[in-house]
Image: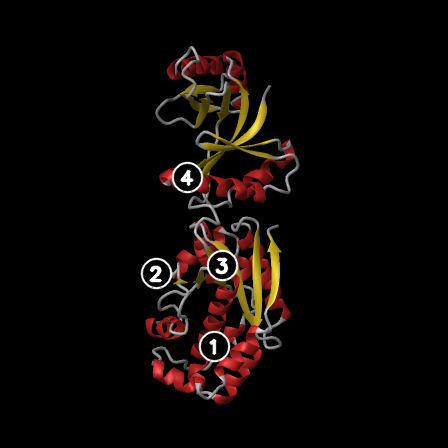
């Protein structure tokens, strides 16, 4: 009996030695969570692979699109699964190339050494039968237009496929700790989140707003970005929303305006560290990029980071140029959302000439004009939690 399945391959997990089961189990759970909306789908671990089966004909594209967004998958192939019998293999192989023309070759992997024909003999026999059935095809073993793969497994089952789709690679989400993404409405932070999810971090997000100076449309924009990020974060993203309105008003009223952004970002990182400790999150993730804007000079980042004492700050985009970031934003489908003209709180009360190389003692002197701890407490108390599901 022939069944449509998807074969999934993983890359770096092979390097994990005694811990390999943990990484495989994490990836298996992530695949199951991503496909939970697909009726009758089944995810099974087979030697060195995973196999997805049970989905209907009209769900195949949904399965493929979801697998493309799961970190830890190196590549995957839509395939047909049949019993390991030579006539079954030949029939299924002919069917796979029945609508094709041009050049082809057959590549066989015979894991089942008890099968009477070896790999070369299987390929030669199948190739000859394909040529007889389809006069529009010719053999080219050097540079073929089509490659038919036959994988004869030890369980007396054979997989046949012609297409290999590249995954995003990396490590399964959840195997490298938890990260709190500082999520603005811009281009950089969603990409930073994607990069860390690809390395196995389970993402949570913290978004700062200054309603009514920032609009409800800005919040909706962040929720849409969160839906996109959730697709790469095992299907959901918990987003914490925090108001900085009062804090920004007090800065604007009492402090030298050239320090507005520096003072705001120090408060943000203070809130972020506190939230990490409360929720058991291991790291803060920022989309900062060295030298991109005034607040991202080494001096500015050093002064801002100074308020964080116990939680590491990850900046995966630190050495990217802007085009590299934009390219990834387009790849993960966040770019068009990010460029909508609804901005976050970092875009209000912006001075004409912000300080680019702040001195810590001068920044601390400005903070003394405020009741910093009380204002941070008041901001923290505004925290809302929203769980965003992937589409």
Asked if 228 appears above or below 76 in the picture, the reply is below
- Which mark's residue is nearer the viewer, 4 or 3? 4
Q: Can I make out residue 157 in this image?
A: yes
Q: CA distance from mark 4 to mark 1?
A: 43 Å
Q: Earlier in the sequence, mark 4 or mark 1?
A: 4
Q: CA distance from mark 2 to mark 3?
A: 16 Å
Q: Earlier in the sequence, mark 2 or mark 1?
A: 1
Q: Earlier in the sequence, mark 4 or mark 2?
A: 4
Badge 3 crowding class, 10 Å Cα cut-off, few under 14, some 14 to 19, many 20 or more, is many
Residue at the (55%, 38%) spot, across then down: 64
Element at badge 4?
helix
Q: How many marks?
A: 4
- Which mark's residue is nearer the viewer, 4 or 1? 4
x, y percent for residue 349 = 51, 81
Q: Earlier in the sequence, mark 2 or mark 3?
A: 3
Tell me the number on the disc at residue 20: 4
Residue at the (40%, 64%) spot, across then down: 313
Left or right, 318 with reference to 49: left
Badge 4 crowding class, 10 Å Cα cut-off, few under 14, some 14 to 19, many 20 or more, is some
x, y percent for residue 263 = 45, 79
Instruction: Confirm or deny contact between disc 4 and disc 1 (CB under 8 A).
Output: no
Tell me the number on the disc at residue 43: none
Q: CA distance from mark 1 to mark 3?
A: 20 Å
Instruction: Residue under label 1, please give it.
Output: 264
Element at badge 2?
loop
Tell me the number on the disc at residue 319: 2
Q: CA distance from mark 4 to mark 2?
A: 31 Å
Left or right, 245 with reference to 136: right
Asked if 244 appears above or below 206 in the picture, the reply is below
Element at badge 1?
helix
Tell me the number on the disc at residue 190: 3
Q: Quadrant of the N terminus?
A: top right
């Amino acid at each position: 009996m022939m069944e449509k399945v998807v074969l999934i391959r993983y890359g770096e997990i092979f390097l994990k030695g005694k811990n390999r089961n943990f990484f495989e189990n994490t990836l298996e759970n992530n695949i199951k969570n991503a496909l939970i909306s697909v009726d009758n789908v089944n995810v099974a671990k087979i030697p060195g692979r995973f196999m997805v089966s049970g989905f209907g004909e009209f769900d195949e594209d949904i399965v493929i699109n979801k697998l493309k967004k799961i970190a830890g998958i190196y590549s995957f192939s839509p395939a047909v699964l049949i019993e390991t019998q030579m006539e079954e293999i030949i029939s299924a192989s002919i069917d796979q190339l029945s609508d094709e023309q041009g050049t082809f070759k057959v590549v066989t992997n015979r894991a089942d050494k008890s099968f009477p024909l070896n790999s070369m003999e299987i390929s030669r026999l199948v190739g000859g039968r394909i040529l007889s059935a389809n006069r529009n095809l010719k053999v080219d073993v050097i540079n073929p237009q089509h490659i038919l793969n036959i994988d004869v497994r030890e369980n007396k089952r054979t997989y046949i496929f012609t297409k290999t789709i590249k995954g995003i690679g990396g490590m399964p989400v959840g195997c490298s700790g938890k990260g709190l993404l500082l999520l603005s409405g811009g281009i950089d932070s969603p990409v930073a989140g994607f990069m860390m999810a690809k390395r196995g971090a389970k993402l949570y997000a913290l978004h700062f707003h200054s309603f009514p100076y920032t609009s409800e449309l800005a919040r909706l924009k962040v929720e849409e970005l969160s839906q996109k990020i959730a697709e790469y974060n095992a299907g959901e993203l918990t987003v914490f929303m925090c108001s900085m309105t009062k804090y920004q008003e007090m800065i604007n009223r009492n402090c030298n305006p050239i320090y507005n952004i520096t003072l705001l970002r120090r408060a943000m990182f203070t809130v972020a560290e506190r939230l990490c400790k409360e929720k058991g999150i291991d790291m803060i993730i920022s989309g900062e990029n060295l030298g991109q804007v005034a607040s991202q000079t080494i001096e500015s980042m050093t002064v801002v980071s100074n308020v964080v004492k116990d939680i590491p700050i990850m900046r995966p985009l630190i050495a990217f140029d802007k085009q590299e970031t934009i390219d990834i934003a387009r790849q993960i489908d966040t770019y068009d959302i990010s460029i909508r003209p609804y901005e976050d709180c970092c875009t209000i009360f912006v001075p004409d000439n912000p300080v680019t190389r702040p001195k810590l003692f001068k920044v601390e002197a400005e903070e003394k004009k405020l009741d910093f701890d009380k204002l941070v407490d008041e901001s923290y108390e505004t925290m809302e939690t929203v769980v965003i599901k992937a589409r």
